[in-house]
């Protein structure tokens, strides 16, 4: 007689076998949906900004743009990454088939609910939107805790992201005195995830690539005490920014955290990976973390740097670049294909990098503001459109050489 665990394993295997390829791994629907929503949401925001349309949302246009970039687009990619990483962490089969379709459907429903919250009501929209994060945290927590895995902190960060989402709905309804506390918390949580997860994968993939090319000395090591100290310093600085965004103490903490992150990045020796764009882009993406923290701290301390430039260094820079770096690598690897950047992949890396640079430079006055904003929007959206064109067919196709 089978145990409950064996029965669940058999059920998941049957779901994997019966499911269409698109539902055989969390990265498939969520990477595709997240990238598509990045383009659609940006287009809707720009149309609203130009006065061409009126968004049917209870959120103000700028608040909706922030919310959907952080909790819609970034949230989808976090879900896809998490659902794909958990089987590697735990040794358990992936969530697939109808359960994955239901979770992805909940994310889609949340995007529609927030967009049309002016019609269905803010409370209903919040229930669906926050509900997605609570369900995702519950699903991830079940897998991680059942396996006794060490990544419980990541599950906790997902739950906190859900609370930040709820707070952003409250802020939109005028229920919070500090309207920015929710989106600052969301940025802080995602940057912390990048510091945690990026701190594992960037040196690991760099070390593997260097070893493959014959390099035997000076390879990046596993995360150690210094890395923990850097993560802790960053978390403290970001917590201060959430609570006291205008304090000089916060500014100093952010600059200190940026310095530590820069040292951490330098220890991984990314300049040695110039020959391989799919490894190099991980270092480029992570470099936006110290840049963003430094700009944010300097802005608070009185430098002639608008806060929006610093925030977009962390969002359009760190988040978007790391997202594309992870999506391209994970899609290739989990689809059984060679992990190598073809010309379209290298070009989308270039587009997102140029888009981020110009988006940060425009508010500072280093380029013409209007021209820079238009260029950065086109480049940034172009990167995700190119991802959809290049990787969309892979996400819908069966794994090369077998099922998965």
Image (cartoon, rainbow, N blue to C red):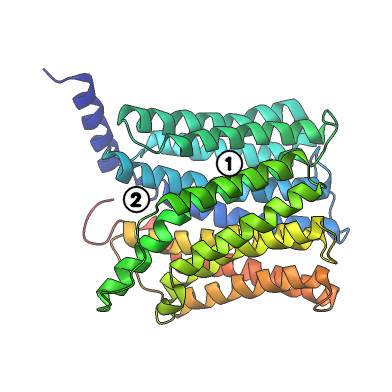
53 to the left or right of 355? right
Figure quadrant of residue 87: top left
39 in relation to 370, above or below: above
Note whether residue 54 is visible: yes
Residue hosting label 2: 21
Q: Residue at x 69, y 62 (%)?
A: 294
x, y (%) of residue 277?
44, 76
218 in relation to 298, above or below: below
Q: Residue at x 66, y 46 (%)?
A: 238
**Which one is in front, 168 or 375?**
168
**Which one is in front, 359 or 121?**
359
> Which mark, by number, is residue 195?
none
Figure quadrant of residue 402: bottom left
Spatial CA distance of label 1 from label 2 is 19 Å
Quadrant for the N terminus in the image: top left
Q: Secondary structure at mark 1?
A: helix
Q: Secondary structure at mark 2?
A: helix
x, y (%) of residue 105?
52, 38
Nearest to N terminus: mark 1 or mark 2: 2
Q: Name the outermost residue toward the top.
A: 1
280 in relation to 81, above or below: below
17 in relation to 263, above or below: above
Note whether residue 388 is visible: no
Q: Residue at x 37, y 33 (%)?
A: 144
Residue hosting label 1: 108
Crowd band around label 2 with a 10 angstrom C-alpha radius: few (<14), some (14–19), many (20+)? many
Numbered label tally: 2
Crowd band around label 1 with a 10 angstrom C-alpha radius: few (<14), some (14–19), many (20+)? many
Q: Residue at x 36, y 64 (%)?
A: 205
Q: Are marks 1 and 2 in contact (CB under 8 Å)?
A: no
């Amino acid at each position: 007689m089978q145990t409950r665990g064996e029965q669940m394993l058999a059920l998941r295997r049957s779901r994997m076998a019966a499911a269409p390829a698109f539902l055989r791994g969390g990265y498939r629907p969520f990477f595709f949906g997240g990238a598509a929503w990045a383009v659609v949401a940006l287009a809707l925001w720009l149309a609203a900004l130009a006065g061409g349309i009126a968004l049917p949302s209870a959120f103000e246009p700028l608040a909706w743009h922030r919310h959907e970039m952080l909790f819609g687009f970034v949230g989808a990619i976090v879900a896809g990454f998490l659902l794909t990483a958990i089987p590697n962490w735990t040794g358990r089969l992936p969530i697939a088939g109808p359960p994955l379709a239901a979770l992805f459907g909940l994310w889609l429903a949340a995007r529609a609910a927030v967009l049309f919250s002016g019609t269905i009501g803010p409370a209903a929209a919040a229930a669906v939107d926050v509900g997605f994060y609570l369900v995702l945290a519950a699903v991830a927590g079940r897998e991680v805790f059942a396996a006794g895995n060490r990544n419980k902190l990541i599950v906790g960060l997902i739950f906190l992201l859900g609370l930040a989402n709820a707070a952003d709905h409250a802020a939109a309804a005028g229920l919070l005195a500090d309207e920015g506390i929710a989106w600052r918390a969301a940025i802080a949580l995602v940057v912390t995830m990048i510091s945690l997860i990026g701190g594992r994968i960037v040196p690991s993939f760099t070390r593997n690539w260097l070893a493959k090319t014959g390099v035997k000395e000076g390879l990046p090591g596993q995360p150690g005490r210094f890395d923990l100290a850097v993560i802790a310093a960053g978390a403290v600085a970001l917590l201060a920014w959430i609570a006291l965004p205008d304090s000089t103490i916060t500014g100093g903490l952010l600059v200190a955290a940026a310095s530590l992150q820069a040292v951490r990045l330098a220890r991984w020796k990314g300049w040695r990976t110039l020959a391989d764009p799919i490894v190099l882009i991980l270092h480029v993406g992570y470099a936006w973390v110290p840049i963003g923290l430094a700009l944010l701290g300097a802005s608070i301390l009185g430098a002639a740097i608008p806060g929006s430039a610093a925030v977009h260094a962390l969002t359009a820079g760190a988040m978007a670049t790391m997202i594309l770096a992870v999506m391209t690598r994970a899609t290739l690897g989990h689809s059984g294909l060679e992990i190598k950047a073809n010309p379209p992949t290298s070009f989308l890396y270039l587009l997102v990098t140029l888009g981020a640079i110009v988006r940060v430079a425009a508010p500072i006055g280093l380029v013409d503001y209007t021209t820079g904003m238009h260029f950065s929007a086109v480049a940034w959206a172009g990167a995700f459109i190119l991802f959809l064109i290049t990787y969309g067919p892979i996400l819908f196709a069966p794994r090369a050489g077998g099922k998965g």
